[in-house]
Amino acid sequence: MKRISVFMLAAIVALGVFAMTACNDDSPATPPEFPTSPEAPTPPEAPADPENPTPPEAPTLPEAPTEPETPESLQDPEPPIDPETPQEPTADFVFTDTREGIVETAKSLLGTPFAEDGESPEEGFDNSGFIYYVMTQNGFENFPRGLGAEAQTGTQITNWEDLEPGDILFFNEEHVENVSADTPHFGGIYIGGGKIIACLHEDDVVKEIDVLQEWWHDAFVFATDLF
């Protein structure tokens, strides 16, 4: 009986030990479940946020430097535009857009002596040579030489009220005797105030003339406006 009880006691102890070991085995099993928490590596999916490298695509915006290229291209054509504009008013002449320039050039030549066939300050002027020089000095590069040809340039003006400085006035002395004559005998540069500057004949000089006087008023044929 004592042996049986000893065996039973040993069995009970063994069962107790087994139960305790079994419990100890269960506890470690649960902690390994914590490693499942490493599912937190799902945050590494946040590196999917590196898809935000799309902002680095923003550096492609430096393509905007192409914009400064446009101003450079604009600067080149701009200068040529300005010189072309003076050519628009007429097809026949290239000239300045100022009447004052014509008047000032004419005034600067006052006192220059008459010279047959002259067309420069150095040699002197005849009547049409003076008009030719003043106009060519102010950009009318194709302005003709000779009074008849000069009278055919520009737009004709027959009313005194329409005259402006820089116009060219033409006269025929036969008009004074009421003779109809369209061919001018002499001309001059109108400077305003009823006056012209002209170089009329031999032994004369470039001078101002008041054309509001009766004789000149009657001798007036027409004026031409080249603007």
Image (cartoon, grey):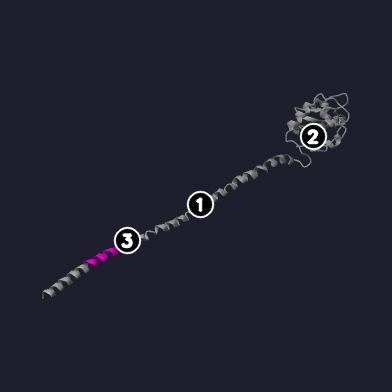
| Quadrant in which residue 207 is drawn | top right
Q: Residue furthest front?
A: 3
Instruction: Give whichever of 158, 119 is nearer the camera.
Output: 119
Q: Which residue is mark 3?
A: 34
Residue 136: mark: 2
Give the amino acid at mark 3: Phe
- Residue 136 magenta: no
Q: Residue at x 64, y 43 (%)?
A: 72
Q: Residue at x 26, y 64 (%)?
A: 27
Asked if residue 29 is positioned above or below residue 104 in the image, the reply reads: below
Q: State whether residue 21 appears in this view.
A: yes
Q: State whether residue 191 appears in this view.
A: no
Q: CA distance from mark 1 to mark 3?
A: 38 Å
**Which quadrant would the C terminus be assigned to in this image?**
top right
Q: CA distance from mark 1 to mark 2?
A: 65 Å
| Quadrant in which residue 15 is drawn | bottom left
Give the amino acid at mark 1: Pro
